[in-house]
Amino acid sequence: MTQVDTVAITDPPASDHRRLWSGWAMMALARLPLPYRVTVLVLGLLAVGEQALEYHLSMQRPQVAPVFRLEEAMGFVLLLIYLLIYLGLLKREAVQGLVGLRPAVLVDDAEYDAHAQRILKANPWMELGLAALAGAAVWALFGESLGKVSQAARGAWTAPLVIAFVAAIYALFGWLLLTLVYTGIRCARALGRLAQRPLAVNVFDPLALQHFGRLSLLPSVSFATVSLIPLILYGPPRLGGYVIIPLALSSLLALLAPIWGVHRQIVRAKEVAQDAIHIQLARAQEIALRLPEVDPQELKAAADRTALLLNLRRAIREGPNWPFQTEAAVARAITAAVSPLIYFILNELLSAYVVPLFR
């Protein structure tokens, strides 16, 4: 263990923390008087119904209705359901991670709860602003399509309801996407602050700190997946790498920036431990250099201690410098964060060099 300044800590049972944090609403949909899985099911069915309505209008009045494409409809519904499910999972996984991380953060309960609140508790005013922004985005991006829907539904008494329904579903999708970004940024900033606090770093067993890596991976993977799903369904965007590269870098930043403080404390703890081992090895060397004067038993003990110290130093050096179990786990996390860029590059290479061979 590294020597750090500590404060008086009184830890209540983990179940108490879980009960407290589980009561916080991470987003507005969690405040509805319905089980969250029912909310996901209802909104998913409404999205399917909205796309079916667009299909019906495109078949009834193809000359004025927006062009209906099945792959775009499937991608829209899939992304909306994914956003709903992931935002629900995000809170559950975050609560579990915070409970597991509690013993490794050397602060009192009040301060730790404040950090947990920044991670888990949404600001209703911010969510209201995101909803207004989503509505404005729908009007700006889909105003022409909504106008065509209005023309296709003209003459029916339900026309205003049709327009409101279609606009509401698209606004819901935009709000969920903005909420995911906002939640990811909020969690990353709060986790980064928590990573700056004194930590109990065990250079031989970093298991307690792995929850930091898990928490930072949650928003990073969500950003990567939201970029990857349209990339697989629709292919590369028109601007190609100019869009994919910034998205991949943002996902990577969301992974590494919040745990930079943990990385620095792990590196510092490893340096302190290696310095202590260096001092012990120097003492063993002094004993070995006094061979004529040293008792054979003392010399054997020094040799055994030297071998042990060398093994410990090797274990410290080979241990991860980030809050993941192994360096391979770090590599997998980085690969997941930049997976859209990897997919884009592989797709471009296949299109340029492999596909022409079969034409």
Image (spheres, grey):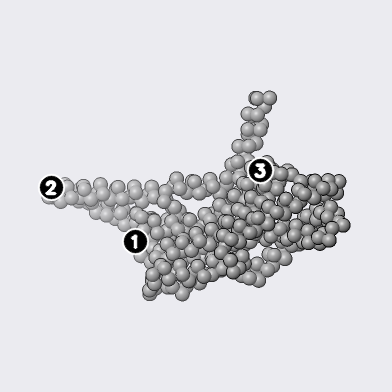
Q: CA distance from mark 1 to mark 2?
A: 33 Å
Residue 197, percent from left and from top: 46, 66
At 46% from the left edge and 70% from the top edge, which residue is drawn? 19
Image position, residue 97 (x, y; %): 46, 61
Q: Quadrant of residue 119?
A: bottom right
User: Mark 2 — residue?
Assistant: 296
Secondary element type, mark 1: loop
Residue drawn at 86 percent across, 54 percent down: 151
Quarter containing the N terminus: bottom left
Horizontal arrangement in the rendering, residue 216 relative to residue 302 (left or right): right
Residue at the location (24% across, 54% down)?
A: 283
Binning the other alpha carbons within 10 Å of mark 1 as few (below 14), some (14 to 19) or many (20 upward) gives: some
Is 315 displayed left or right of 167 in the figure? Answer: left
Amino acid type, callout 1: Met
Q: Considering the image in quadrants, where does the C terminus appear? A: top right
- Left or right: residue 162 versus residue 212 is right
**Sequence-first disc among 1 and 2:** 1
The mark found on residue 1 in the picture is 1
- Residue 325, visible in the rendered structure: yes
Q: Quadrant of residue 219?
A: bottom right
Residue type marked 2: Pro
Classed neighbour count for the residue bearing mark 2: other residues with Cα under 10 Å, few (<14), some (14–19), many (≥20): few
